[in-house]
């Protein structure tokens, strides 16, 4: 079995996945904090239900950002 051919095929997707996972939690927390602060400017108090909705929004946004950024980064650095 030639592992070098498997490594070449799965090199980019593997690094994209690893980088995306490493960036996901800090990016989600940052985006969620920004969403909550923006909401606090218009309202004094943000309820727990609104925070859950904002966290779901931040999760979706951070998934997209991390995958796109990781794809661009891996293509620039490794290719």
Image (spheres, rainbow, N blue to C red):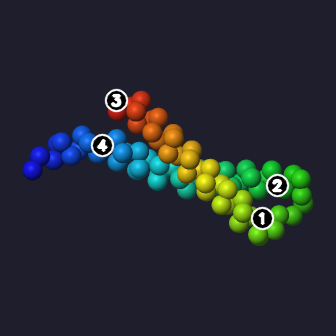
Q: Secondary structure at mark 4?
A: helix
Asked whether disc 1 touches disc 2, contact meaning CB atoms under 8 Å apart, the reply is yes
- Is tag 1's residue or tag 2's residue first in the polypeptide sequence? 2
x, y percentage for residue 3?
16, 47
Mark nearer the N terminus (1 vs 4): 4
Label 4 Cα neighbours within 10 Å, binned few <14 / some 14-19 / many ≥20: few
- Mark 1 or mark 3, which is nearer the start of the sequence? 1
SS at mark 3 in the image: loop
Decide which of tag 3 and tag 2 comes sooner along the chain: 2
Q: Position of residue 50 (x, y in %)?
A: 78, 65
- Residue denoted by label 4: 11
The span from disc 1 to disc 4 (Cα, nearest Å) is: 40 Å
Q: Residue furthest left?
A: 1
Q: Are marks 2 and 4 in contact (CB under 8 Å)?
A: no
Q: Are marks 3 and 1 in contact (CB under 8 Å)?
A: no
Residue that carries the numbered disc 1 in the rendered image: 50
């Amino acid at each position: 079995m030639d592992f070098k051919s498997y490594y070449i095929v799965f090199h980019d997707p593997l690094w994209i996945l690893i980088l995306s996972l490493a960036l996901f939690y800090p990016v989600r927390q940052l985006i969620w904090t920004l969403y909550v602060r923006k909401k606090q400017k218009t309202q004094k108090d943000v309820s727990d239900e609104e925070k859950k909705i904002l966290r779901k929004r931040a999760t979706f946004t951070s998934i997209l950002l991390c995958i796109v950024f990781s794809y661009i980064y891996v293509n620039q650095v490794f290719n």
